[in-house]
Image: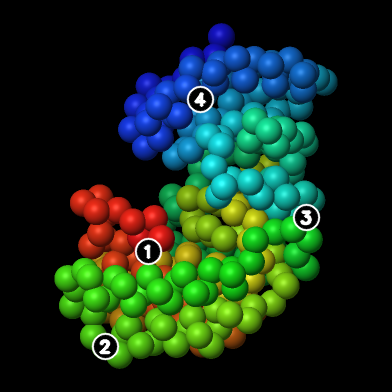
Amino acid sequence: MFATPEEFVRSTVEREGAAGATWISALPGIVGELTERWECAPDGAVMHGGVGVIVPVLRRGGESAVLKVSFPHPGNVHEPDAFMAWGGRGAVLLHERDEERFAMLLERAHPTTLAEAEDGDEVVAVAGRLGRRLAVPAPAGLPRLSERADAWEEALRRDAEELSHALPRRVLDAARATVRELGRVQPETLVHGDLHARNILRAEREPWLAVDPKGLVGDPAYDGGTLLKSRALTLLDADDPGRAVHRLLDVFADAAELDRERVRRWAQFHAVQAAFWARCWPASPRKSGC
């Protein structure tokens, strides 16, 4: 019998309101329908992330898998497209998909994430190597990061004017320059889009596999910026944060086989975005800029 985790119910309803409550009430029926259609049986406690539930199941024949059902959201649309393009190369395998229900049957990995590794260099190197493998020619129909450049630049301008902050002018100018010089023309490469250590899991088929991709087309160095932003608290705890940042840039760029300067610039852009996000959330969230 499927039981939706209480914490997930609460966070979904708080975030999505009436639409979230309606979806939560339908979720047990969706899970029941899909497990029957895909010939699966529940096999463990239900887990959840921010926007979806993960149901461990056994497929017909005894193969372990997970059923993932997400709240319908534009950001989740192309997740299965990315898995299909990778075909298990550096990411979990996609067995089945239901686009209407935002559901997938996926290869099961361990709940242990790369974020639990004690060696910071290992975290960044593993993510870099995976990022390199995930950077493949993009299939048709996926959203492009270059299409967000105008919105990024406008958000930087507006946030700098409207929010109180202590960011020097040169820091803001550098972030805007990255958008202008790297953001508007990007390669036709599939990238994860949200590559960080919690989205990389221990697995049986390979030591580590990526999960929860956004399925975007653009510069692989963009994922380096996402990863390094996620390491911010660790970097702040370092004896010499500046030196620690430069070391992680070196480790990631080497492992991902990317130009270090491009990774550095995207990382700086992400850091500025994050600084403004912290200023405007949750007091006055604005989806376009924050």
Residue 105, located in which quarter of the rendered image? top right
Q: Quadrant of residue 176?
A: bottom left
Which of pointers 1 and 2 lies earlier in the amino acid sequence?
2
Q: Which of label 1 and label 2 is nearer to you?
A: 1
Residue 256 left/right relative to 48 = right
- Nearer-N-terminus badge (2/3): 3
**Amino acid at circle 3:** Ala
Mark 4 or 3, which is nearer the eye?
4
Q: Nearer the viewer, mark 2 or mark 3?
A: 2
- Disc 4/disc 3 C-alpha distance (Å): 29 Å
Asked if the residue under mark 3 is in contact with the one under mark 4, i.e. CB atoms within 8 Å, the reply is: no
Tell me the amino acid under the disc marked 2.
Arg
In terms of sequence position, does the residue under pointer 4 or pointer 1 come before the other? Answer: 4
Q: Residues within 10 Å of mark 4 (few under 14, many from 20)?
A: some
Kindly identify which residue carries mark 3.
Answer: 85
Measure the C-alpha gap from mark 2 to mark 3. Answer: 41 Å
Query: Where is mark 1, residue-wise?
Result: 289
Kindly identify which numbered label has been placed on residue 23. 4
- Local packing at callout 3 (Cα closer than 10 Å; few below 14, some 14-19, many 20+) is some
Camera-side residue: 245 or 81?
A: 81
Residue 108 in picture, x, y percent from top left: 66, 35
Q: Position of residue 189 (x, y in %)?
A: 71, 70
Q: Give the residue pinned by disc 2.
A: 169
User: Label 4, label 1: how many angstroms apart (C-alpha)?
Assistant: 27 Å
Using the rendered image of the protein, determine whether residue 218 is visible from the camera's viewpoint.
Answer: yes
Nearest the eye: 219 or 235: 219
Residue 273, by quadrant, is bottom left
Q: Is residue 255 above or below residue 104?
A: below
